[in-house]
Image: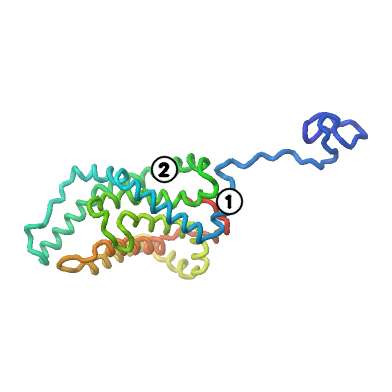
Amino acid sequence: MLNCMRCGAPLEAGRRFCSACGAPIGGAVPPPVAAAPPALAATGNLEKNPFLALAVVAGVCLVAPWILWSPLGWPARLVGLFVKPGDCSSISTGSWDMYTCSARVGLLTLVGPIIIMALVFVFRKAVANGVKALTPKIPPDMRFAIAPLVASLCFTMSWAAVHAYTADQTGFLPQRGFPAVIGIFTYVVVRFGGAIQDRFRSFFDTVQRIPKFLRIILTILLPMGIALLITNEERVSQTAIKEQAVVMLCLVCGYLAMPTRQGAQPANHAEGRL
């Protein structure tokens, strides 16, 4: 004997409707389909307009790091309290000793931020799991901004520590607002990375044939060489704009040299990948 597809009650011969729930007989009513989990639900229409979505990403990644500037910078600054970088005030300006001393002080100043970024990298899976747990609580229309925001906040942990006393300087952007560039870059790579790689496939295929270790070396040496070139002055001028330019160069070099192969992304691609 057949059962009703809606309520499961036995069906009586010769009847066109279930006597228990009134559902039509003959397979017209499909079994109920479970709703998609919130984390996997499709986004709304916001990201279908890439310019509007980019504006949202820029706003979120500008405001959040700006507000959280001090607390995000404190972990690296606390680590830095145990390191004494010293100073070069007693060395003649423009001399080789001044150059090497400045390099040493700069590297020691970066110890705290480097350690914090290393910890973020080591525990990146835990960070990703935390973001996944939080994702269902975020409105679907805004989930595309999660990965850019996390990238901006992680970058701020080091940037805010290094610029604790120079936060009000301005380059392309105020130093407090520069982490937004990291979020925007992350969004562009996630959203348009596949299309970019499809458009310039021959270039990326050529890059992939270069040994990986050599690409890593070039990714480090090229920005470093440019940084040394533009700061080769007796007293470095326009420090903020030069710092920001070097960071953006690092982002571009890193993406071009170490691309993650992607297919073209659909127009309504919802969530970034961490």
Q: Judge from the rendering whether residue 83 lies leftward or rightward of residue 42; answer left or right.
A: left
Q: Nearer the viewer, mark 1 or mark 2?
A: 1
Q: Position of residue 62 (x, y in %)?
A: 39, 53
- The foreground one among 28 and 122 is 28
Q: Position of residue 258 (x, y in %)?
A: 41, 60
- Residue 10 falls left or right of residue 119: right
Q: Residue at x 36, y 44 (%)?
A: 122
For the residue labelled by badge 1, is the local secondary structure a helix, a strand or a loop?
A: loop
Across and down, in percent, residue 210 comes to: 40, 66
Q: Are marks 1 and 2 in contact (CB under 8 Å)?
A: no
Q: Which mark is residue 44?
A: 1
Q: Is residue 157 above or below residue 245?
A: above
Please count the marks in the image: 2
Query: Residue 214, how many percent across, how many down?
Result: 34, 63
Tell me the distance, in whole angstroms, between the alpha carbons under discs 1 and 2. Answer: 25 Å
**Is residue 269 shown to the viewer in this render?**
yes
State whether residue 125 is above or below residue 196: above
Report which quarter residue 80 is drawn in.
top left
Q: Residue at x 27, y 45 (%)?
A: 76
- Marks 1 and 2, the one that precedes in the sequence: 1
Q: Amino acid at mark 1?
A: Gly
Return the mark for residue 127.
2
Residue at 24 percent across and 55 percent down: it is 166
Quarter of the image for residue 75 reads: top left
SS at circle 2: helix
Residue under the point 50% across and 51% down: 144
Quarter where residue 37 is shown: top right
**Which class describes the residues within 10 Å of circle 2: few (<14), some (14-19), or many (20+)?**
some
For the N terminus, the quadrant is top right
